Image: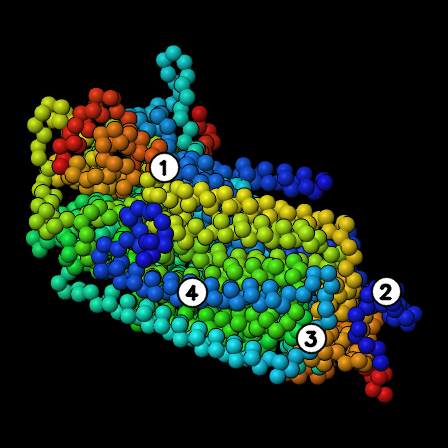
Amino acid sequence: MIIAAVPGFPGNQTSLNPVGPGAGRIEGEFALIFWITAIVYCLVLIALIVYVARRRHSMSDIPEPMPTTPQSDRWAKVAVSGAMVVTVLLLFTMMIGSFVTGHALGNMNRQTAYTIDVYAHQWWWEVQYPNDEPYKTVVTANEIHVPLGVQLRIHGTSRDVIHSFWAPNVQGKRDLMPGYDTDVMMQIDQPGRWRGQCAEYCGEQHAHMSFYMVAEPNHQFQQWLEQQAQSSIAPSTPQTVHGQQVFLSHACVMCHTIRGTPAGSRVGPDLTHLASRATIAAGLLPNTIGNLGGWILNAQALKPGCSMPPNQMTGSDLQDLLAYLGTLK
Amino acid sequence: MITTTAIESTAELTDQERLQAARLESVWREPRGWGWFKAVHHTTIGKRYAVTAFVFFGLAGLLAGGMRLQLAFPEAHILSNDLYNQFFTMHGSTMMFLFAVPMMFEALSVYLVPLMVGTRNIAFPRLNAYSYYLYLFGGLMFYVAFLCNTGADRGWFSYVPLAGPDYGPGKRPDFWAQLITFTEVSGLAVAVEIVVTVFKLRAPGMSLNRIPIFVWGQVVTAFMVIFSLPGVVLSSTMLLLDRTCNTQFFNPAVGGDVLLFQHLFWWFGHPEVYIIFIPGTAVISTIVTTFSRRHVFGYLVLVLSLVATGFMAFGLWVHHMFATGIPQIAESYFTAASMMIAIPTGAQIFCWIATLATGKVVLKTPMWWAIGFFFVFIMGGMTGIFVASVPVDLQVHDTYFVVAHFHYVLIGGAVFPLFGAIAYWFPKVTGRMMSEKLGQATFWLFFIGFNITFFPMHLVGLRGMPRRVYTYPANMGWTTLNQIESLGYVLLFIAVCLLLVNVSRSLRHGAPAGSNPWKAGTLEWATMSPPPHYNFLHLPTVNGREALWDAAPNQPVVVGLDEDVRSFLMTRSLDAEPDTRDEFPRPTIWPFLAAVATSIAFIASIFTPWGITLGAIPVAITMIGWFWPDRQPAEHRRTREIWQSE
Amino acid sequence: MKSLIAIAGLLCVCAFAGCKREQRVFDPGSSGSQPANGVALNEVHAGGPIQVPDQGPYEESAYAVGEGKRLFSAFNCVGCHNHGGGGIGPALMDAKWIYGSHPQQIYSSIVQGRPDGMPSFAGKIPDYQVWELVAYVRSMSGQLPTDVAPGRSDEIQVKKAEQAKKKEHPPDETPQKIQKGQP
């Protein structure tokens, strides 16, 4: 009903289009507060306008002050007391609604939830899918695939400053702070790519720190997870072989990991399955060859202040590198 | 018996009164020329506070214009990300620390409270002057830093670790932290003066239940200042120590805590917004009373609501931290408290509407601003209930929804009452009336422009736009709303310009005001416009809540105070019975020098810890000069008292 | 009027004074972003003098030194040099400089590598980031002014903050006393 009141808006990255029980319950409390406060606001202001209009005196002079007696103020006393009683009752209603909603959100089951670790960096999201067998742990960045209809536990912290993990279609936000480990429970019931964004000012590129939660049926999710757990395949064509050499001999190797190659740095996002992601630069650009090339050559022009330096290389080197990165599915 | 009926001008005085006025004027006169730095009278200092605060309001408004320009287009490059971060931090810090509190609390109370309680000066006049200079120097420091590319850029609440030594290189957060120190010392000083003025310097007969609501509001605010400001002084000092002295307060790796900063800051931060809002309600009570032509309905309820709000404001601070993952039971407590504070505020609103509904409403410019306050502030209060509820807050926190909320409550709760206060008290401060036509045009432009600018922010926040973003992608569906908001800014800008035109024109060509053009009831209207430096020719006594409306036909005045010196009467706290008398200090240069020394110490400490230790020496010297006892008046007084007792 | 001019003049002076420390250059341009390869250590050159790059801009910008600090950990300099105290590699916070303490000399050490274990980072780090590292390395021995050098880090404390470090005097930067009677 709220959507009807706000005409024509898209459904992504908004709390008014819930796709799971978390955001759904919040929208319920939102609607309760919205209707109560809207009606109260209108009533109070109509009363104000009516009385000002009725009691206004001529503009030309200021009359002498009126005497007031307890009798003259009697109906005012009754009216104000009545309004106070109604106010208290309505406030209690909204407050209890808030407690009920909060309680329900807090009761989302922790034990059986599927855990995903999120580590917030300036200005990207490191995502890990822990596994009892360490070699099966998946490390990726900025794109969080989740199974539909399954309770999720996003276990998060920050590696530097305070960030906030917020996917409004799914759940309320949670601040990720250094020195604190936090759990937030979520569940997504509608398939799709639900956009989220950092919601706590974290420095120069706070505006460009987004992520996507990709909700898909469980079998698809398991397929994706297995694929992500693989090492990268060795390049086979001369172009991609040379591209890998470009990767390993330039600055890339100082910050990025590609499993299956000697590159193992954890400073920047894991690139082992870069080509399987739909966006780059924390949701800034679609993952196309042109965008990726521009990002590699001069990330500072696109996201000034971010940690990726500009890289100079010849055109053919860049093309080979892009061809190699395109094989990292 | 001489009465306190309003004195229109010196033409009405008897010869004896004229002599008396001349004597008082010679004793209370403020020095000219270089003596500008020696002024200690509260009306002088109050006017300086108001003008300075308005200049900062203008600067912060221009910064907002830059922000709106940058946000009018997706992925715009009008302001770089670094510059935008400085802009929104400077805008927020200026509005909160350099405009809102200095204007709503310091300027209004320093100028009006001594007049409204019927005394000749504020308590501790030299401290008053000192506090003004500190405020001025702190603001100047902040803006000079901004011009040197060292403007604070970590948000007006400057969270750690982003503002900490590791992630905030350079000196920008240090200047923010010292701005806090300047403005909070200044605020604390004025708070102490107001409490003492209101409890000890009231006119005889002004018992607690006859204190004007405006004064009640300011004294509640003063208590809130005293209890809340230490929180931010602590957090900003700890930040400065972490950045310059290797302390570990906020270093999680060795046992420090980043949330400690937030708790200390918001312990202050929540009462801060009530420090800004309660003087606004005080102004609205005054305007509604005067322009409904009756005593305000529910005086006791209003006073108790002010006190209750003052107390409850200290129990809400964690609602700024709902997203940090605190335990559910703690969150529930703060939700309950945040919603319950709507009860006293609601009581005030209903009492004002009842006053209007049973009075004769006069629609002059101040009353229009009061009506605008109702529309805007109540909307902000309603969205406050949204953010008070934890689940809903977890969706709207740190989005434009909350930006809309706090602009509605702050502009509605402070700026609208302030512009009403300007229209209302301008005749008293300057002796001239403002233009009604320009005043109403200003109101409508501002009201419409405000709603066009800030209402869409609710929607764009619900559509997912976070705060403090220097730009946004074009495909998010936020562009149109942002453009509407930026256009609304233009109307706001024109409205404020119109206000300035009105002020400047009225200063030169406004109709002479007389002492009580609104036929109001409080004591400041009992004297000339502008008030002479001795405030009242005859110190008044009070017979009811509205001193002038309830004055008896032969309302007595205070006699017997020595008029050769700056004497004043102290009365008892509860019933304002005359108690004792003392002397106010004469104009002196020491507060200015002490403020200069203190400023040097504070600014030096940004660059070296030795700044405080070595800088304390000049401060001590100036303090010694300040407090050096003046033998003559004490002996003179003793001689007089011995003579009088014989 | 005169006071207004005086104030405006003061503001202009301030505008220049504080600028450099707070400079934030995110995009160093094409010359700064090429992979680091080398820098001339003096001006003597076949064909005429050349300009030795002036590293002031990096040593005067607190942001650049802060970036250098971040890169010092990110590129694992701490693996051998720890946080300046040395270990596998020599200490960087003292007055002893095996290969010289001037910025160009430190740059060369990083880019060329050095015998007995210092890797060569030629081609691996963009030029401007090497200069940021150089500025940070110099701050570790207290060479930078206290308002530019970094404060304490948000880690376990293993040393004083660079801004609190007493300035060391490397022999090649300290003028040597000339002894009497010696040519």
In the rendered structure, are the residues bearing label 1 and label 3 in contact, judged by CB atoms less than 8 Å apart? Answer: no
- Do the CB atoms of the residues marked 1 and 2 lie less than 8 Å apart? no
> Is the same chain shared between marks 1 and 3?
yes
Q: Give the percent coordinates (x, y) of residue C113.
A: 24, 31
Disc 1 is placed on an element classified as loop
Rendered position, A259 above or below B111: above
Instruction: Give the distance between the C-alpha atoms of the residues marked 1 and 3, in whole angstroms.
Output: 66 Å
Return the residue nearer the eye: B318 or A268: B318
| Residue drawn where x is 24% and y is 21% of the image | A315
Numbered tag placed on residue A66 in the rendering: 3
Q: Earlier in the sequence, mark 4 or mark 3?
A: 4
Q: How dense is the environment of label 1, judged by Cα within 10 Å: few (below 14), some, or many (20 and up)? A: some
Query: Taking B299 as reference, is B479 left or right?
Result: left
Q: Is residue B627 above or below residue B61?
A: below
Same-chain status of marks 1 and 2: no
Residue beneath disc 4: A39
Distance between mark 2 and mark 4 Cα atoms: 55 Å
Dot 2 alpha-carbon crowd within 10 angstroms: few under 14, some 14 to 19, many 20 or more: few
Mark 1: amino acid: Pro
Q: Quadrant of the N terminus of chain A?
A: bottom left
x and y percentages locating residue C133 in the rendered image: 33, 37
Q: x and y percent of residue A8 in the render?
A: 34, 47
Parent chain of label 2: B
Q: Which residue is mark 1?
A: A304
